[in-house]
């Protein structure tokens, strides 16, 4: 047991060094092969036969998986659906600059061997973003001589959701409140979707980006030549030279909050007390000094996701924080309507809102309203006949929502929640962008999961040892075979251990004391109810007094 504890401490120190000594939070964000490929496609304005960002091309040549794709695996070792458009985009970039012939061949082999199988078996129906992006990448690949051949059976069956791409465009052209906005898929818009240079310029953010999307901004620069776009892209490459993230700039507070959330849900908060307190203190000061102001409708979901997560973590750690820090959306009807109309794509936001309201005090009516609002939309979300993006990409997410709605937070046991989170770790993500979820690479590393697993098993071994001790104590005193009443030794210890798993250190006499007191109280209660005579009960009462 001591060896196990020493190995846990060694892992804790290693992870502290990796997660909290690095001041560049962008190094924690998983790079997006898709967005990196789009930057690699941009020709140098002064030397059009060369790429403007050669480092992106180098990254692709060095980042292809052995299986032939670019992208990530899910929690079960299966390539994610993101890898399909990402692999196509990477092959297009390589083909455009006549490099990486072997990499292209491996990528083509992967696409032809796995695309239909992956979509039909794991992602049928496919997510909305995929139905927009994948056909565009197939067309783009064809334009550079990379013909992607899909079977007729797939086109008529598994591919029918992709074939609705035109319908998605036509139904969203006039809907400026659709989430994510259609213009954020600028690089994937079909040729018949006539978007002018003026339209692109109109949608540029102050930082020169199209909704902070590297891929859309890369295409915007190739079409418009706007200096603001190239300034944004150059800033991005300076900050993230080894593969770009799917969104830039990142909300660094959200990155830190996600780190805290992951550690807490894995049952590791006790090992990182100082680090968590430092992060939350900084976030709390930020929220205390934040001014209320108008919010752009398309950035509301991301802000609400962050604010509700911050509220929950801050309150759980004893900080005074007002419900208004995330309930601001309740008093703006246009924002509420936006959330309702896009609820099927915002279930991760709504789940965060719902979980934040677990920490509600009496009389906090805004929290009551937020709980009712989010619960109604979550119930609608999981009742839909056709699964939406979140539930398609992460099937365990549906079970998480169902558990949250059916079993109140106050009725759950932290130790068991920690185990569930370890088992479904792949669903923890930062945010759902325009092309699926993106997350923090540091939150899914083997060391962190191994630490959580060892910590859980170590606690279990202590609990088993203490249960044996309590059982022997009860038997030695004759409490377990008195001939009357309930035998509640195991029950009393379980209640003591479960209720204190997040508050007490591994080794604590408190669990044993509480369990033994509970056993004695149970015996005394049953003696009063079933066994003792009136004289005996009066004598016992006097003795207790």
Image: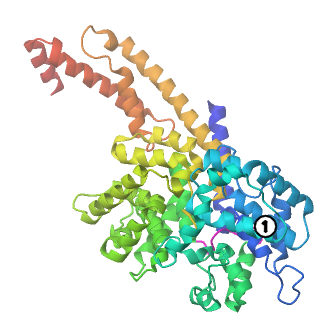
Secondary structure of the residue carrying numbered label 1: helix
Q: Give the image location of residue 64, x and y in percent.
A: 81, 57
Q: Is residue 314 above or below residue 248?
A: above
Q: Which SS does the magenta portion mostly show?
A: loop
Rendered image quadrant of residue 9: top right
> How many neighbours does mark 1 have within 10 angstroms: few (below 14), some (14-19), or many (20 or more)?
many
Q: Is residue 4 left or right of residue 310?
A: right
In the rendered image, the residue lying farthest to the top is 483
Visual colour scheme? rainbow
- The span picked out in magenta is 241-250
Q: Give the image location of residue 431, x and y in percent.
A: 55, 63
Who's the residue at 38% across and 12% down the image?
475
Rendered image quadrant of residue 472: top left
Quarter of the rendering occupied by the N terminus: top right
Q: Give the image location of residue 424, x and y in percent.
A: 56, 44
96 and 256: which is toward the camera: 96
Q: Is residue 279 above or below residue 485?
A: below
Q: How many marks?
A: 1
Q: Residue 268: say if magenta.
A: no
Q: Is residue 426 above or below residue 337?
A: above
Say whether residue 22 is visible: no
231 and 460: which is toward the camera: 231
What residue did someone put label 1 on? 141
Q: Is residue 338 left or right of residue 95?
A: left
Say whether residue 203 is visible: yes
Who's the residue at 61% across and 60% down the image?
162
Who's the residue at 12% across and 13% down the image?
536
In the rendered image, the residue lying farthest to the left is 534
């Amino acid at each position: 047991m001591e060896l196990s504890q020493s190995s846990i401490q060694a892992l804790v120190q290693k992870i502290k060094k990796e997660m909290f000594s690095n001041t560049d939070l962008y190094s924690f964000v998983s790079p997006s092969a898709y967005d990196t490929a789009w930057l690699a496609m941009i020709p140098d304005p002064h030397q059009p036969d060369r790429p403007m960002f050669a480092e992106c091309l180098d990254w692709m040549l060095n980042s292809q998986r052995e299986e032939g794709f670019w992208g990530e695996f899910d929690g079960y070792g299966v390539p994610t659906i993101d890898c399909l458009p990402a692999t196509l985009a990477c092959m297009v970039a390589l083909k455009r600059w006549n490099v990486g012939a072997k990499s292209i061949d491996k990528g083509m082999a992967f696409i032809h061997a796995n695309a239909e199988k992956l979509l039909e078996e794991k992602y049928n129906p496919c997510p909305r973003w995929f139905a927009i992006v994948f056909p565009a990448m197939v067309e783009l690949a064809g334009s550079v001589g990379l013909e992607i051949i899909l079977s007729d059976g797939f086109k008529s069956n598994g591919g029918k959701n992709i074939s609705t791409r035109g319908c998605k465009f036509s139904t969203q052209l006039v809907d400026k409140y659709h989430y994510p906005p259609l213009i954020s898929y600028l690089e994937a818009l079909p040729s018949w979707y006539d978007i002018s240079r003026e339209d692109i310029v109109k949608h540029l953010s102050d930082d020169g980006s199209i909704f902070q999307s590297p891929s859309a901004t890369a295409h915007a620069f190739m079409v418009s030549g706007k200096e603001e776009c190239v300034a944004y892209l150059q800033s991005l490459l300076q900050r993230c030279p080894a593969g770009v993230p799917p969104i830039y700039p990142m909300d660094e507070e959200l990155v830190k909050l996600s780190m805290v959330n992951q550690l807490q849900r894995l049952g590791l908060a006790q090992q990182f007390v100082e680090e968590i307190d430092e992060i939350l203190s900084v976030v709390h000061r930020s929220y205390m000094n934040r001014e209320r102001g108008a919010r752009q409708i398309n950035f509301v979901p991301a802000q609400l996701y962050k604010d509700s997560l911050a509220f929950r973590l801050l309150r759980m750690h004893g900080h005074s924080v007002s419900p208004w820090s995330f309930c601001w959306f309740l008093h703006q009807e246009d924002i509420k309507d936006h959330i309702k109309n896009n609820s099927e794509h915002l279930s991760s936001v709504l789940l965060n809102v719902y979980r934040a309201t677990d920490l509600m005090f009496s009389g906090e009516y805004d929290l009551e309203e937020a709980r009712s609002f989010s619960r109604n939309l979550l119930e609608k979300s999981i009742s839909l006949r056709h699964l939406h993006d979140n539930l398609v990409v992460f099937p365990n997410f549906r079970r998480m929502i169902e558990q949250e709605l059916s079993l109140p937070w106050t009725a759950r046991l932290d130790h068991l929640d920690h185990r569930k989170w370890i088992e479904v770790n792949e669903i923890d993500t930062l945010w759902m962008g325009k092309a699926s979820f993106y997350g923090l690479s540091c939150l899914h590393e083997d060391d962190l999961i191994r630490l959580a697993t060892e910590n859980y098993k170590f606690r279990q071994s202590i609990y088993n040892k203490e249960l044996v001790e309590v059982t022997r104590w009860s038997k030695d005193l004759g409490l377990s075979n008195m001939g009357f009443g309930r035998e509640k030794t195991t029950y009393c210890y379980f209640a003591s251990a479960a209720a204190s798993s997040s508050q007490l250190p591994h080794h604590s006499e408190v669990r044993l004391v509480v369990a033994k007191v509970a056993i004695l109280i149970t015996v005394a209660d049953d003696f009063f109810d079933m066994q003792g005579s009136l004289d005996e009960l009066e004598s016992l009462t006097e003795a207790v007094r």
